[in-house]
Image (cartoon, rainbow, N blue to C red):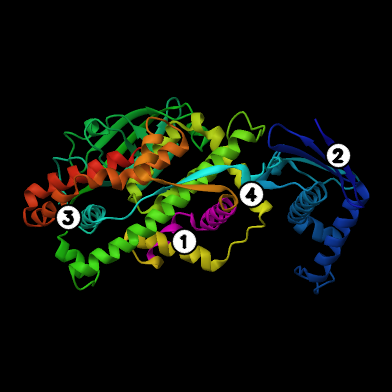
Amino acid sequence: MTETTETTLDFNITVKDAGPARKLISVKVPADSIDKEMSVSMGTLQTQAVLPGFRKGKAPSHLLKRRFGTAMQEETVQKLVREGMEKAVTDNKLLVLGNPEVVDGYENLKLVEGKPFAFELEVEIVPEFEFPDFSGIEIIRPQLEVADEHIDAEVERQCLRAGKADRLEKGFEPHDRMLGSVKLTADGEEAPLFVHDQALIVLPEAGEKGQVVGLLIDDMNTHFQSAKAGDTITISTTGPEGHEREDFRGKKITIEYTIHLCERIVPATEEELIEQFNLGSEEVLREQIRLALEQRRDEEQATVMRKQGLEKINEVIDIELPERASGDQIQRELDRMRHEMMASGEHTPEEVEVKLAEIRDDAEVGMKQRMKNYFILQRLAMHFETQVHEAEINARIASMAMQRGLRPDHVRSELAKAGQLPSIGGQVRDDKAADAMVGQMKITDMPLDEWNELHSGGDTADKKTSKKTGTKKAASKKAPAKKASTKKASTKKASTKKASTKKASTKKSSSKKTS
């Protein structure tokens, strides 16, 4: 255990280890400093406060204390805690993550005239470690040329995305979209854990898992087979141990979902897609899609190499990690993975949430390595002095918008409403720092088929990413029939619903290995 004591005119500060990647900061403010601070606050108050019957600046101090004493104390406590924390961080060169926690609770911090003021804070920090020589590490860049079959598959996918929604009352099938209200309660507790009036779910393939407000449900379709709009569906599940909310972890949870409406997507025709995006001709459409696929390929290559580099660094760096991930740590990682998947353009927002639910369900298994990666990325950003500019954030949002066929301002609005806009900058910084690391490593090019063969059958982050890169290649084998079926689907609505959703599900199931 390490211990350092720092004394200043106003603070006595002690910093101790509070466990892996955490510090306990003890602060004691001498009585004379408290009295001085309170005296300054009272002097400021006397010059500004106005009480009935007294001119400004003339009210007696005992009346001011009676009227404003509590607020003045609270303001002074906040100031002392803030400045004490800043002093501890600066003097001890701590790299703090998130907000500090007051050990005894903020509400229990009180100032007593003539007595010292003491408090304790716990903070999460980035551990210290040394990086290896990056130039001695070899990574592989899988190579893929975008071909006609890839464009065919993407045209079909975009037709599905641009399709029109038919309202349904019953007879729900895989890939139907439902909007409803949801209430989650834990066994033995009266107050609900979570309530939401606009919860979206997408029914998965028969027998597969689906998600409701981020919780993974086995064979979800069975709960909705005989349901109709207006029904309330009750589902029992157990909160994953790796959930970002501690009050969900390990709890037996009852989900009550009331269906408000349900829709089934009828794919657009290729001609409708051309008209919707004002592209003029099929040739222009295919050229635009080719450019988008090449950009996606390049981004996937970069992601694959970042993950390889992080995995190699992970193997040689020993970091003492907390026994259990905090809610903040899990939430940061989920946000990072959400933005990474959305930026790739491979998945709809609904598919991303299913994948995140799968990650939550298995979070304890992989969270240690992901937490370690997070710490490595923070140190990399410091090591390379990585800076993020507003133009880079805008470019990332524009890329996400292009991959989803939306306007950048629409995507920005979505991110802002979900409270995820600030984390985009963090994602850009992480990627830039990882790219700087990759830039110093030895890169070897390899055809995608060889890469997939080399990494088939494993579960590492590397292998999962390689399958994502190979998704288009695997899909391409059936591509010649897809182009014809796309136009046929546009004219036969009744058969289209099943045929198109089955094709879409094939891509979905193949990409489920991605995350």
Residue 455 seen in this snapshot: no
Residue plotted at (38% across, 56% down): 296
Q: CA distance from mark 1 to mark 2?
A: 42 Å
| Residue at which label 4 appears | 380
Most common secondary structure along the magenta stretch: helix
The crowding category of the residue bearing disc 1, from other C-alpha atoms within 10 Å (few below 14, some 14 to 19, many at least 20), is some
Q: Nearer the viewer, mark 3 or mark 4?
A: 4
The crowding category of the residue bearing disc 2, from other C-alpha atoms within 10 Å (few below 14, some 14 to 19, many at least 20), is few
Do callouts 1 and 3 mark residues in contact (Cβ within 8 Å)?
Answer: no
Lower position in the chain sequence, tag 1 or tag 2: 2
Three-letter code for the amino acid on which mark 1 is drawn = Arg
| Residue at which label 3 appears | 267
Q: State the quadrant of the C terminus.
A: top left
Residue plotted at (13% across, 40% down): 171
| Residue at which label 2 appears | 4
Do callouts 1 and 4 mark residues in contact (Cβ within 8 Å)?
Answer: no
- Describe the element under mark 2 as helix, strand or loop: strand
Q: Nearer the viewer, mark 1 or mark 4?
A: 4
| Residue at which label 1 appears | 396
Q: Is residue 177 left or right of residue 190?
A: left
Lower position in the chain sequence, tag 1 or tag 4: 4
The crowding category of the residue bearing disc 4, from other C-alpha atoms within 10 Å (few below 14, some 14 to 19, many at least 20), is many
